[in-house]
Image (cartoon, helix red, strand yellow):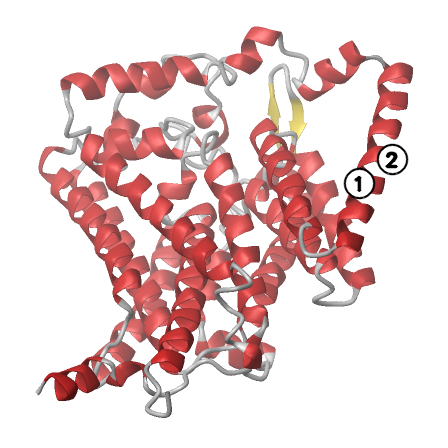
Amino acid sequence: MMQSARRIDSSEYERPVVHASRRLSFLKFFLRYPIVLLAFGPPQFKSTTALAGVDTSQAHFDIWSAISVGWISVIALRAILRLVAMRSILIPKQIRSILRIAFSLGLLFLGSVAYSPGRIVSLEFSILYFLTLICVVEFIVDTYRNPPNWLQCIFQLRLVALLLFAVVLLTLAFAPSFVMVIVPGAGIRLIGGSVASMPIVCPLIVIISAYTFLHSLESRTRAALFFLVGLAGTLVIQTRGAELSLLVVLPAMAIGWAKSSVRSAQTLIAVGMFALLIGGVVVGVVGGGRIWITFNRGADTESFFTASGRAGVWADVIRYSLIHPQGMGYIAGIRASRISTSSNASMHVTLNHVGGTDNSYMEVLTDAGWLALALYLLMLVRTVALGWRFAKKDASSALASDIFVRHSIQCALWSLTYCLGEGMESSFYVVPLKQEFYIQYILIAIILGASASVLIGLRSRFTSPNR
C-alpha cells in the first residue's frame, strides 16, 4: 500500500518534462504565450494632461482605458478557457504556495472595496488584478506540460521593450507632449507618458542585453548595440531611481558572471580598473560638484536624501496607516486623499494627474493596509528565493538537455531586482493597466515557470523507476 501510494504521489514527476524546445516564430510565440503581450500595455496615445480636472478615484470613461481593459480581458479570457479545458492542473507545491499568497493579496484588495471612497474603481482594479494572476497561472500550467524555449521568452520580452521604445521615438517626432514633460527644476524628461513607460522599457533592454552579452547567448555585436540603445534611453529619462537601480544591478550581474571562470574574473578586474581610471579623469576635469549637480537635476542635497520630497508623503502614509491599519481602499483611496499632494516635490500629480505615493510598497500599504504589504513582500521574497535556488549551476546541472533554463531564470531575476529597486520611486508596479505592473508579473511568471521546469526535472531524475 505504501509503495502504491508513493507511486501515485510521484506520478506527475515520472515523465521528463524539461527538454530543449525549438524557437517559435514571432507570431506563433505570441499566440502560444499571449501573457507577454500584456507588456505592450497597449500604448495609449493621449497627452499627460488628458486627466486634468478628472477625479480619478471615481469611475469615468476613456476610450484608451477601455482599449486597455479589453486587451487584458481578451488575453485573460483565453487563459480561462484553456484552464477550463485542461483535465488536470499540475503545479509544484513551491509554486502553488507563492500563487496562494498572490491570490490572498488580491482578496485583500477586493475586500478594501467595502471602505474605498471610489468603490467602482477599486472593484474594477481588483478584477484586473485577478485577471492578470489568471494569465500567470495559465502560463505556468502550460509551460509545465510543454516547456518553451525559456531563453526565447527573455528575448521576446526585450523585443516588446524595443518596439515600445521605437513607438515613443515616433510619437516624439509627431506629438512630443504625449511622451515628454517639462518638470520645473529638472528640465525636459522623455518619460514616455501613456505611450510607453521609459523607466522600465529602457532599463529592461539594458539588463537583458548586458546579460546575453556577458554569457554569449547571442551575437555580442547585437547585444552591445541594444545595450547602448537602452542605456541612451535611460539617460534621457533623467530618473534617479532608474539610474541608481541600474548601478546596483549591472555591477552585481557582472560580479556573478566573473565567478564563472578565472578568465571572467580577470576581465572584470581589468575593466573595473580601467573604468575607475576614466572616472577619476572625468571627475578631475569636470569637477565632482558639477557631476553631482547634473545627477541631482540641479536640486540640493536635501532633495536627494528626501527622494525629492517623497519621504514626506511616505511619512504621512505611515502615520495614516498606524491609525487605519486596513488602508484606504485599492487604488481609489490614495487618489481621493490629499496625502499624495502634501509634498510639493511629488511628481505623480505633475506627470500623471492622479494621486499616488511614488512608491510601490507604500502604495500597497495605502491600498489594503499592513497585512497586504506583508503579503506583497512575502510573495516577492519567496519568488526571488525560489528563483535563486534553481538558478544555481549545481541545481540545474541535471538539465543537460536545456542548459539555458538557468540563464533565463538568472536574467529574469536581475530584471525583477531592478523592478524591486525602481519600485521605491514608482507606484506603477502595483497598479493594473500600467506597463510596470504587467512586466513585473511577466518576469515573476517566467521565474516560477522556469523554476518549475528545473524542479520537475530534478524530481523526475530521483523518482525514475530505473533508479
Q: Secondary structure at mark 1?
A: helix
For the residue pair 42 and 439, the one nearer the viewer reads as 439
For the residue pair 173 and 102, the one nearer the viewer reads as 102
Q: Which residue is mark 1?
A: 269
Mark 2 and mark 1 residues within 8 Å of each other at the beta carbon: no
Label placed on residue 286: none
Rendered residue at 53%/69% (across/down):
405
Q: Could you say where residue 173 lies in the image, as x and y percent from the top left? A: 72, 46
Q: Amino acid at mark 2?
A: Phe
Rendered residue at 40%/81% (across/down):
461
Q: Secondary structure at mark 2?
A: helix
Rendered position, 346 above or below 410: above
Rendered position, 172 above or below 304: below
Rendered residue at 23%/30% (across/down):
333
Rendered residue at 36%/42% (across/down):
430
Q: Note whether residue 178 is visible.
A: yes
Rendered position, 19 above or below 430: below
Q: Which residue is mark 2?
A: 274
Say which quarter of the image contains residue 164. Answer: bottom right
Q: How many marks?
A: 2
Which class describes the residues within 10 Å of circle 2: few (<14), some (14-19), or many (20+)? few
